[in-house]
Every structure is written in structure tokens, then in C-alpha cells.
Image: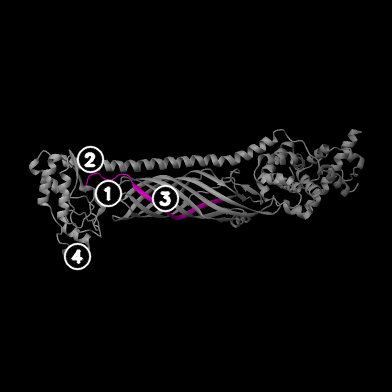
Amino acid sequence: MNDNQFDEFFKSKLGKFSSDIPDDMWQRIHKQDKDRRGFFILRWYWFALLLLLFTGAGSYFVLNNKATDKMNNHVAKNEKINTGKKDESNSAEEILNRENKRNDFIFANADSEHTNLKTATAQHTKRSNQAGNTKVTQLPLKKNTVSTSSDLVFENDYTSSKRQNDKLNNLTLTNSDPADSSNDKNPLTKTLKEDSSEVADDEGKDPGKEDAISDKFFIEFYASPTIPVNSISSNNAAYEQTLKNAGKMQFSYNLGARIGIRINNKWSAKTGLLYTQVNEKMNFTDSVLNGINVSYNNRYKSIDIPFLLSYRTQWQRSFNSAINAGILLNISSRYKGAIPDAYGDTRHLDNSKIYKAGTGASIFLSVDLSKQLQEKMDLFAEPYFSYRIKSITTNLQPFNQKINAAGVSVGIRYRLFKKSDAN
Amino acid sequence: MTEAEIIKGCKKKNIACQRLLFDVYAGKLMTVCLRYACDKQEAEDILQESFIRIFDSIGHYRFEGSFEGWLKRITVNIALRILQKKKIKFSSTDLITNENISAAEPKALSALSEAELLKLINGLPDGYRIVFNLYVMEGFSHEEIAEMLNIETVTSRTQLMKARKMLQQQILSNQKMAI
């Protein structure tokens, strides 16, 4: 028997032969496959629950704060009126003085109507003669102003009628003749000039001291498209090049929520939750699959807790800027997809322990630019950069990888508490 | 179900189709694993990893060529990956005590069962066994084997020659003992 016949004998004998397999082999295969797929989904639910709790707590604070503010306003008004009841001789004057000192904000209507004072007075008298222990009266409007909620006054019967006459007699008119406004066509300016003692001029005023404790706490929600910056290194130069050629970063993003506390005029601290998803397209030749070109959509998902300090560099009433710096502490990382190993074999990310479950800390730096939308709400844009300190690969891997990120976050900041007493 | 239906079901991650595929091909793939592994435990590990990989990669199968051949190639590649991690040495140490070995008689060979043949192959040193399997059973050329294992072509030829001689020596020894 020559070599060929010898070889052929082995090939024919063993080529079609089926060996016995262990009884539990299928269960072992099925369990390993199931465990690998189910692991990530379970952890995802935990993050969703955390984010829901965080958002719910923040919403509760916001809504509770709004209700508290309204209640405080009503209580304050009632207290002001009731303190004037006992001293009848000065009640009208005091009431009128308080009425003259309006809230900080007087909004001039650009299309303000020139109110007929007599008509307004007649309406006022009519309403105040209505029966009832408690009356809501609409104070007569000054010209070139618009009515605000502070114009509503809760009065009892005794003071009501007396006040009406006193107010009519002492009413201050800003401009009885609409024609007189021709010299200054801007109604806001006109009003500000004549009622300068009443108007809080926000523009140009140093807000530093007054706004110092205007927002003790604040909450932020934001999102950002992310530019991932992938850094790979290996002692095996060929493998390093294979990895670099195989992967191509795709559109990535992050979502976050932060709660902050203002320490003083300039400094504040923030923390919260940040979810980041980095997407990568992988294309390489699989040697186990006999040279087939395979592609995978890799997902690098992480949850970090930011610990930031913010330094406010500039502020006006409606525009702020600040610098944020700190660290992002990774609490969970999950991966999906595959990469080639040094032999060209496919290694799946979710079960091969290539990357760490907790990747440590990143350095975070950003510039915060915010614009006030409402009294308690700001819109902000925050260009940022985060730098991962350590490699995300486990120790036994033949390569190191860091995924840094840059982007511009856009979000909403809501101030939770406003100062209750003006200085 | 036809083979094509089973494959399509496996692409959709249908558990029932995966089980059918396992039932049909597990025995043949186990034979492949036993040829490459040092022992049965190692063969089971190779088989388990192979099926995980097959289920993951079946989406890449394009219905070109023999499906059984595709499965066997994946199993062989998985086996090689696992064995290469053990850093196999393709030494030229002579383990053959007698160079003048007469070829085994056909009658002696035909008397051997498949299990005995597998046992003989398992008894080979790692380098001999891998090259013998790749050349004789899988049909790779020495040049292809050299590239796969990162060895010289002449090393591959030498390993194969020594593997044959060792097997023949073992067969003759067993035959003498039987007599």
C-alpha cells in the first residue's frame, strides 16, 4: 500500500463517520448562546429605569416649585392688604403706595392702547359696588402699561369703597394725552422715563449681587450628537493596522440629565447621568469563514456619572456663559458587534470579554452658553470634549483602545428655587 | 424540512431549526473535532465553540457549495484557533524508532474500526496530527498548510511523512499484539 492508498483509506473511513456526542451538548450550546444574548438587554432595562426615576424626580421638583411660587404670591398679596386694615387713616395712602411700587417687571406693550381714563374709572366703580365680602377689583390701568397679575387685589368690603375714592383722587397719570407721546414714539421708553422709580431696569444693572442666590438648584436635560475619536495601539503592528482599517466610526450621540447646586455667585457643582452610544461600522475578512467579508454594526454603550464644577464667567439678565470641568465616572459599559482578532477570526464583543464592563473615568471640559427663555428656564449650548484616561480593553487583549468624544450639547436648564425676598 | 429551510430558519435565529441542524450535523462535526483534539474533553469544547460560531455566522452563508463542507471548514478553523493558542511546536524530533517500516497490509487496515483509527490519530504529536488532518482529510496543499500554520512548506511535508510512518508503526504493533 503506497502513501496515496494509505491516505485514501483514512479519508474514506472517517470522512462520513458520525461520532457519539454527549447528551447535554445541545443544552450547553443553547445556554451559552442564550446567556450571551440576554445579558445586555437586562442591563439596559436598569438604565431606563434609572433615567425614568431621575426624570420623574426632576419633574416633581419643577411642578412643585411652580405651585409653591403661585401660593407664595397669593399669600404675600393677602398679607399686604390685611396689614392696612387696622390703620384706617393711612390705609388708602399705604395701599396706593404699595400699588405704585409694582413688581420688578413692567412689560410695555408695543401696541399699547391709550386707555380712556374715565371709562376705566367707570368700570372700576361698577365692579367695586358689587355685593360680596370679598371682591376682586381691577385697578385702573396706567397709560402705556399692560395689566399684570399684580393688578388683581383681594379686598374686604370695608376698605374697598374707601380706597376707590382715595385712589381716584390720587391716581397718577403717566400721559393723559396720547398726542403727547409723539416726541417719544417708543412706549416702553416713555413709561420707563416717567415711572422710573417703579421700573426695575434690568439692562445695565449689575446683577451680580442681586442674582447671587436667585437659583439655588437647577436641573438640566440635554442631548448631543457626538464625534467619537477612536485611538488604537498594539505591539502587533499588523493587527493594529487591521483594526484601524476595519472600523469606521458612525453617527453617535449622548443623552443626559444633571442637577446642579449653586455654591456662590460664580461657582456651582453638577452631577447626574449621561448615556453615550458610539456607533462603528466594522468590515473585515473572516478567516474562519474561509475568507468571507463580514460586516458588523458595533455599538459601544456607556452610562457615566458626571462630577463637574462650573465657573460662571459672564452674565447678564438673559445671557450667561460658564466653563465646566470635571470627570465622568463610568458605571456601566456594554458592547455589541464584533471585531477581528489577530488571526482574522471574528470575535463577538458581547461575550468575549474584550472590553471592560467599567471603563473608569474620563476628563470632561466644556463651555456653557445659555440664553434665558423664561424666568426660570434657560436654553443652553455646551461644546464639550471628553478624554478617556485608560484603555477600555481588558488586560489580556493584544491591543489598547480609547474612545474619546467631542460634540455640542443642547439642552434646557430649569431653576428650581427663586429668592423669596428682594433686598 | 429541507436543508434550505433549516438554514433559513437558523438565519432567523429559530431555536427549532438550530436544534434540527445540530441533530443532523453534530455527529460528523464531532468526528472532525476528535481528529484535531488531544482528548475527548478538548473535542467537546471545540464542538461547542463551533456551533456557537455557526449559529452566529450562518447569516453569511450564501448557499454556494456544500453546506456540510462549509460547516466542517468552520469547525476546522475553530479547532486550529484553539490549538494555536497552545503554541504548538512543529519539532523535527524523531519519535520513530525504526525508519525501515514496512507499509501496513491492507487487511490489517480494513480490520480497524473508525474509533480505532481516531484513537491512532489522537496518539500523534500535535504537529503531526494537525498536518496529517489538513493534508489527508481536508485536502489542503503543503503551501496552504504552511501559510495557515505559519511554518515552512518543507516542515509541512516532513510532518506529514513522519505522521504516516508513526501511524503505520502503530498499526503494525497492534496487529502483532492481536496475533
- Label 2, label 3: how many angstroms apart (C-alpha)? 35 Å
Chain at numbered mark 1: A
Element at badge 2? helix
In the picture of the structure, the residue carrying the numbered disc 3 is A222
Residue A184, disc? 4
Q: Which chain carries label 2?
A: A
| Mark number, residue A212 | 1
Residue type of the residue flagged with mark 4: Asp
Kindly report which numbered mark, 3 or 4, lies closer to the viewer in this rendering.
4
Question: Do the CB atoms of the residues marked 3 and 4 lie less than 8 Å apart?
Answer: no
Magenta span of residues: A400-423
Distance of label 1 from label 3 (alpha carbons): 24 Å
The residue at which mark 2 appears reads as: A75
Q: Where is residue B38 in the image (x, y as percent from the top left)?
A: 74, 39
Numbered badge on residue A166? none
Same chain for marks 1 and 3? Answer: yes
Front one among A228 and B99:
A228
Rendered location of residue B77, percent (x, y): 71, 47
SS state under label 1: loop
Q: Is mark 4 on a helix, strand or loop?
A: loop
**Pointer 4 chain:** A
Left or right relative to B116: residue A380: left
Protein chain holding label 3:
A
